[in-house]
Amino acid sequence: MDGFGPDYPRTVWEVFGDYNGRRMALIKALTIDAKEFIRQCDPGELDKANLCLFGLPNGQWKIDLPPEKVPPDLPEPALGINFARDGMQEKDWLAYVAIHSDAWLLSLASYFGARCYFDKTDRYLLLISHVFKHDNANLKLALYSCLYVSNKLSNPVRKSNKNAIRLMLHSVCVGCRKCLFDMINDLPTVLEVVIQYAKHKQQAISLDQAVCFTC
């Protein structure tokens, strides 16, 4: 028993897929579905105190109470986001929730990354991805070595490159968690998307007003 539920991610690719699915859900809640999200976060409903915004791996979002289990199985999103709704401007409140959402996503990825054992298959795939991304001769040499070690090639690697291969394999193959967060860092944060969406929305409103004025 590893303490994981049956649907929890266990590989680099699964953890990244979980992160991106939840990220897209949170972005949707704070942009396209913002009106419905704001409606569900009514601070006047006392039976729904301490609401949380959850992003699900399938790209859906929900407003719900935190789990009652203590300690929880997974890191929890920020509590009580509904309390600040009416005390801030809408765009500022959405940005506030976005910041906490980014923190929650990273805490989940860190949790899964710490609990997962990334096996050799993940390391080979990560190594191959680095080769094509960087087109580096040393990385190609490391890939050649990795394939030879796994009996996928028959010719040995030159002994003169032994140390370089060892260092490259160590930095690329063992650094699976670093690769995971490199992939995460390549994506815009929830906050960045929310701010950009608000700017485009305001520009569109300004343009409509300008057209109406000239008419």
Image: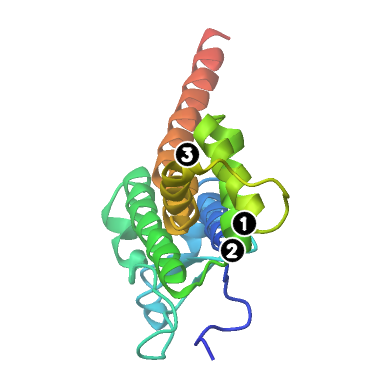
Q: Secondary structure at mark 1?
A: helix
Dot 3 or dot 1, earlier in sequence: 1
At label 1, the amino acid type is: Val
Residue 149 marker: 1
Residue 140, x across and y down, in percent = 58, 37
Residue 120 marker: 2
Residue 194, x across and y down, in percent = 44, 42
Tag nearer the camera, 2 or 1: 1
Left or right of 128 on screen, residue 183: left
**Circles 2 and 1: CB atoms closer than 8 Å:** no
Tag nearer the camera, 3 or 1: 3
| Residue appearing at x 57%, y 75% in the figure | 8
Q: Nearer the viewer, residue 6 or 132?
A: 132
Gap between marks 3 and 1 measured at Cα = 16 Å
| Residue appearing at x 54%, y 30% in the figure | 137
Q: Nearer the viewer, residue 136 or 213?
A: 136
When asked about the image quadrant of residue 101, the answer is bottom left
Left or right of 24 on screen, residue 53: left
State which quarter of the image contains the C terminus. top right
Residue 54, x across and y down, in percent = 49, 67
